[in-house]
């Protein structure tokens, strides 16, 4: 397919540490298994290490590694910020003024040779990407439907309902949600999944099992077949 009709999705979460990166990479592998060319993107990443090649973020590197065809790091992560904190604070500490135009330009380069671009946000939906830039602004600028990752742990029901309500209230298209078993000791996880299915206005598109310290995205991809079908428009 041509870049002008590239499919796309913004992966956001109910909070930080809920499995967005694991879910994003698993989704990329599920899409690739459908024969699609897929690239990942982390527009703003706080918490980057200095390397001989420049600042690098762990999550962005994982997205880059999962991309096929390969993508330049500068396009995968156009705004790399050293301090591991809220992007607003990290940008201020680095003396950087994060803006949308470089993100839009990098996205266009990624989409030029991809059938699907999976864009991973930073933190939860209402965690600003920068001073004056919300996730809703990014979704609108790139015309991205949203996939919500719900970390399955105590408090997830309220966080998921609030996030879904806000995404829709911001005028963005909520494609669906996926659960992510971030806490292997979480009691009554199946019961909470039932509550979430009843409470959220969009379908559950998969549940990513607890992956341990070193998740295998190829194995986890099997849990996101429905999400891949929804993103691919099948």
Image (cartoon, grey):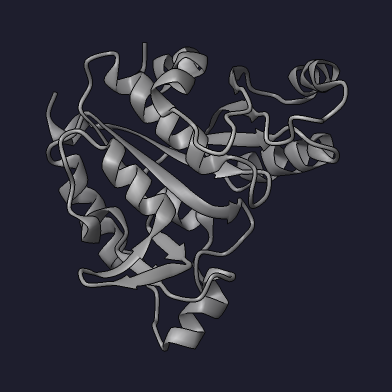
Q: Quadrant of residue 55?
A: bottom left
* Residue 214 screen position, x and y as percent: 50, 36
Q: Is residue 229 above or below residue 147?
A: above
Depth order, front residue of 3/219: 219
* Residue 226 screen position, x and y as percent: 49, 13
Image quarter of the C terminus: top left
Q: Quadrant of residue 213?
A: top right
* Residue 128 screen position, x and y as percent: 57, 64
The residue drawn where x is 49% and y is 18% is 224
Q: Is residue 49 above or below residue 33?
A: below
Does residue 227 appear in this view?
Answer: no
Image quarter of the N terminus: top left
Depth order, front residue of 58/87: 58
Depth order, front residue of 183/158: 183
Query: Image check: 170 left or right of 101?
Result: right
Query: Image check: 102 left or right of 148?
Result: left
Q: Is residue 158 above or below residue 125?
A: above
């Amino acid at each position: 397919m041509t870049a002008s009709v590239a499919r796309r999705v913004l992966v956001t979460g109910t909070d930080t540490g809920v499995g967005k990166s694991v879910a994003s990479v698993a989704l990329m592998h599920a899409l690739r298994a459908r024969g699609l060319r897929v690239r990942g993107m982390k527009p703003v990443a706080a918490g980057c290490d200095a390397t001989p090649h420049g600042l690098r973020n762990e999550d962005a590197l994982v997205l880059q590694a999962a991309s096929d065809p390969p993508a330049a790091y500068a396009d995968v992560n156009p705004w790399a910020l050293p301090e591991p904190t809220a992007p607003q604070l990290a940008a201020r500490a680095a003396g950087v003024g994060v803006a949308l135009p470089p993100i839009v330009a990098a996205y266009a380069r990624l989409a030029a040779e991809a059938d699907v671009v999976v864009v991973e946000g930073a933190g939860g939906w209402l965690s600003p990407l920068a001073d004056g830039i919300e996730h809703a602004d990014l979704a609108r600028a790139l015309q991205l439907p949203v996939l919500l990752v719900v970390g399955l742990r105590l408090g997830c029901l309220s966080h998921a309902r609030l996030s879904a309500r806000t995404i829709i209230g911001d005028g963005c298209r909520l494609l669906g949600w996926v659960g992510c078993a971030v806490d292997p000791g979480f009691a009554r996880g199946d019961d909470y999944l039932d509550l979430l299915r009843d409470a959220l206005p969009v379908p559950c598109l998969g549940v990513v099992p607890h992956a341990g310290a070193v998740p295998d995205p190829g194995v986890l991809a099997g849990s996101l077949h429905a999400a891949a079908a929804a993103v691919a428009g099948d």
